[in-house]
Image: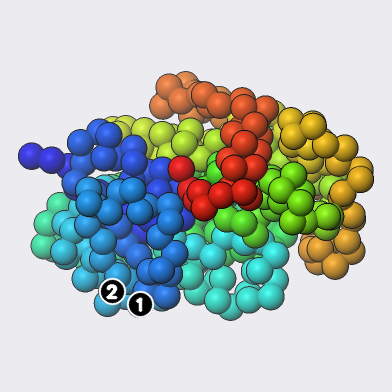
Amino acid sequence: MKKRALVLGCTGQLGSYLMELLLEKGYEVWGFVRRSSVGNVARILHLYDRVHLVNGDLTDTSSIESALRVSKPHEVYNCAAQTQVGTSFIEPLHTADVTGVGALRLFDACRMMRSLAESPRIYQPSTSEMFGASTPPQSEATPFNPSSPYACAKVFAHHSARLYRRAYGMYIACGINFNFESPRRGEEFVTRKITMAIGRIRAGTQTELRLGNLSARRDWSHAKDVAQAAWLMLQQPEPDDYVIASGVSYTVKEFVEAAFNLAGLDWQKYVVVDPQQMRPLDVAHLEGCANKAKAVLGWTPTVTFLELVKEMVEHDTILATSDASYP
């Protein structure tokens, strides 16, 4: 019998890579699509004839329960959330409802399923933003110190996952993911904003790139590698929490320099530091220690920082001059 998986947030970056991975492994794959984002399916158009889609929303418990009843999943991957740190300062209540309480709604719906069938294994993506100003490198033992409404919501979801794991014996594994990118990254995130600007500059349709804090240091991996880690977590005998990171950090300025160099451009001619782009609070340095994931899951990143930047620059250079979309 085929394993069945339900991927919430399947139209997003991580969700789309997870759907591809699960299909490759022979799963029957169901995607949970937020009603208002049904039109935003570019990342999964190539999968339409191979997956089942069901509409729902993490703010609507009945739609979560309905999706679980229809798909009857063995594994659930919760990639649905409001994930933009900057937006969370503008819409803190919405962020808390979707990213924090939304995860709790999912856990409780899965708990209730146990009266009907076997409880599914659940993957909950936590985030390095939960560490805030904690001293790097950050590991599973590092205290949380959230510096944004988004990070606070993720801490709530993370602790809710651990609570349901202990109180109800549920299988909920949390991946504490450091930044992950790809050509499928949303255009509002800084890495994609950089590579899309390069494509448009080369195409002659953009003349400058306005950015905020260039000194923020992040640990970047490829979303495909994070998807692989998520799947590995649900194959273990017992659920646990794992930091997923490359173990190497770079500043936003270093990302800019690498991307512009690959494109043969002088970044200083185009980049403008804009105070309006600054966040009320910004985390200075996130760098993960993924020793546990390497030892227990056998996971290591396969894509280097420069390979990741190169893939994104090349994709967005083509995109800027054609009708191309997500790969």
Residue name at image x 62 percent, y 36 percent: 314
The image shows residue 177 at horizontal and vertical percentages of: 55, 43
Q: Are marks 1 and 2 in contact (CB under 8 Å)?
A: yes
Residue name at image x 50 percent, y 74 percent: 97
Indicate left or right for 292 with 148 as reference: left
Q: Secondary structure at mark 1?
A: loop
Near mark 2 (Cα within 10 A), the count class, few <14, some 14-19 or many ≥20, is some
Is residue 146 in view?
Answer: yes
Q: Quadrant of residue 273?
A: bottom right
Q: As displayed, is residue 305 above or below residue 63?
A: above
Q: As displayed, is residue 38 above or below residue 249?
A: below
The image shows residue 49 at horizontal and vertical percentages of: 22, 51
Residue type pointed to by label 2: Ser
Real-space Cα distance between discs 1 and 2? 6 Å
* Tag 2 residue: 63
The image shows residue 74 at horizontal and vertical percentages of: 20, 48
Considering every residue shown, the one lying at the far left of the view is: 1
Residue name at image x 32 percent, y 62 percent: 32
* Tag 1 residue: 60
Q: Secondary structure at mark 2?
A: helix
Frontmost residue, 254 versus 219: 254
Q: Quadrant of residue 84?
A: bottom right
Indicate left or right for 283 with 92 as reference: right
Frontmost residue, 12 versus 57: 12
Indicate left or right for 64 with 134 as reference: left
Which colour scheme appears in the figure?
A: rainbow
Indicate left or right for 301 with 230 as reference: right
Residue name at image x 30 percent, y 57 percent: 31
The image shows residue 189 at horizontal and vertical percentages of: 65, 55
